[in-house]
Image: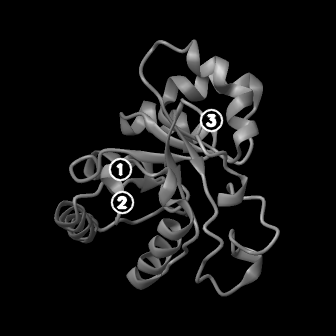
Amino acid sequence: MRPYYLVQENLLRRNLQLIKRVADEADVEIILAFKAFALWRTFPIFRDFIGHTTASSLCEARLSLEEFGSLAHTYSPAYEEEEFDEILHCSGHVTFNSLSQYERFASKIAHFTEHSVSCGLRVNPEYSEIETELYNPCAPGSRFGVLAEQLPEQLPAGIEGFHCHCHCESPASALEHTLEHLEAKFSRWFPDDAQGL
């Protein structure tokens, strides 16, 4: 007997309807993280409720473009030089782990004309409610993301936003507390109309 996944479409649709309602009421975009779910045969159902995906590798970025049908929001702690042109081809957003990583690829981005790519930086708010330090990307000494003290007064011209990843099966209150820390540490780089998020 061959192993297989059994998906109850009615339950999947019910969960996706809830996600869409939350996104609409909060006026945010919720995107599908392939690390959590990449069963590509269900993507036609997902597309009824969710418009974009995340990717953390070239293979996931290609999965987003070729099977989900949208440009990925791509983040990787380390991009490979020989893969980066194809990552740009598959991505609408690319997030960098450090300023030096962004600077390393800035010329490739500047010369990319196929479609627009929004660039961002992963930031470390130095706050997380993940209890196991091994899995905490904000633990002291973490190399995930840029600390506020490491940013220049003026961000590089191509950086359009911040990315923060410090939750894992966390309640909404954890996000609320994280947003308070993000605002306290990084609000001086927010656009004027984004203050008090």
Numbered badge on residue 192: 1
Determine the CA span between mark 3 and mark 1.
35 Å
Determine the CA span between mark 3 and mark 2.
34 Å
Earlier-in-chain disc, 3 versus 1? 3
Foreground pick, 17 / 67: 17
Q: As shown in the figure, which amino acid type bears the numbered disc 2? A: Gln
Residue under numbered circle 3: 58
Vertical arrangement, residue 66 with respect to residue 29, above or below: above
> Which quadrant, please, contains the N terminus?
bottom right
Q: As shown in the figure, which amino acid type bears the numbered disc 3? A: Leu
Residue under numbered circle 2: 195
Q: As shown in the figure, which amino acid type bears the numbered disc 1? A: Asp
| Tags 1 and 2 touching, CB below 8 Å | yes
Numbered badge on residue 13: none
Q: Secondary structure at mark 1?
A: helix
Q: Position of residue 2 (x, y in %)?
A: 55, 60
